[in-house]
Amino acid sequence: MAASSVIGWAAEKTVLRPVDFERLFQDRADAFRRYALELKLLITKENAVDFVHRLVRDHFALHFGLTAITHSDVNKRIHAAQSLGWLGDVRALEPLIVALSDRDANVRGLAARSLGRLGDPKAVLPLVSLLNDRNHEVRLSAIWALGMLHDSSSVHSLTGLLESRNKEIRLEVIQALGRIGDVQVVKSLASALKNSDQEIAAQAANALRRMRTPEAREALEAWDSDQRKLWWKFRQGKQY
């Protein structure tokens, strides 16, 4: 029996009783365990009930989300755009990419964040195009999502936003670059360390620490040395 039949069988049950879980574990044990292995979960008779509850819940949530993401009711589209990312199902990828063009900014922003949670690199280019969205919150969501995808192909587009006049955008970009962790971002982050805005400099330092590469450590050491020199000059000035 195919592992997918476990979900089909559970979803067909309008009421799941204890005897159903017993039957599931006994009669469909091989398929049940194979499906569990795909999710890297250890399934035992004791935790079977919780696991099947999750299968049923996610099955219906996915079905609802894939239907609602194009619904005429904007509230249903918003709910779908938000929930599909948490389910982690690749079938939501294309509908969420389409939702990036939704006329409602909330849908676009939530779809972007859901794509970041799905982690599929196919979403990189559509998310990069969203960096020019007319809505500020949508742009922030796209930057966050690109950081979560850890794909170096978005670095060039992101570093261009370090010159943005909007501080919130710059802070989000620095954080995203740190998550991506590509060596090519070190130079940009090292420049941000010298920013006169201490919040920008601190965010850049945190991003470099997160990277944990030799290049990032070297940039941080140089910055720490400069900071110590400035502190020493300040102390000397206070003495006179």
Image (tube, helix red, strand yellow):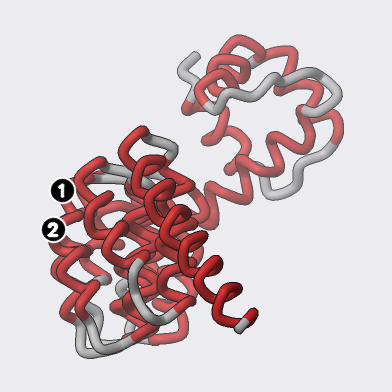
Residue 133 vs residue 9: left or right? left
Q: Give residue 153's mark.
A: 1
Residue 125 vs residue 13: left or right? left
Residue 87 vs residue 131: left or right? right
Where is 13 relative to 140, above or below?
Answer: above
Where is 234 relative to 149, above or below?
Answer: below
Asked where in the image residue 191 lies, by quadrant, the reply is: bottom left
Residue 213 vs residue 231: left or right? left
Q: Give residue 47's mark.
A: none
| Residue position marked by numbered label 2 in the rendering | 156
**Residue at point 40%, 64% (across, down):** 113
The crowding category of the residue bearing disc 2, from other C-alpha atoms within 10 Å (few below 14, some 14 to 19, many at least 20), is few
**Residue at point 62%, 45% (across, down):** 56
Quadrant including the C terminus: bottom right
Contact flag, marks 1 and 2 (Cβ < 8 Å): yes
Given residues 12 and 62, the one toward you in this image is: 62
Query: Three-letter amino acid code at disc 2?
Result: His
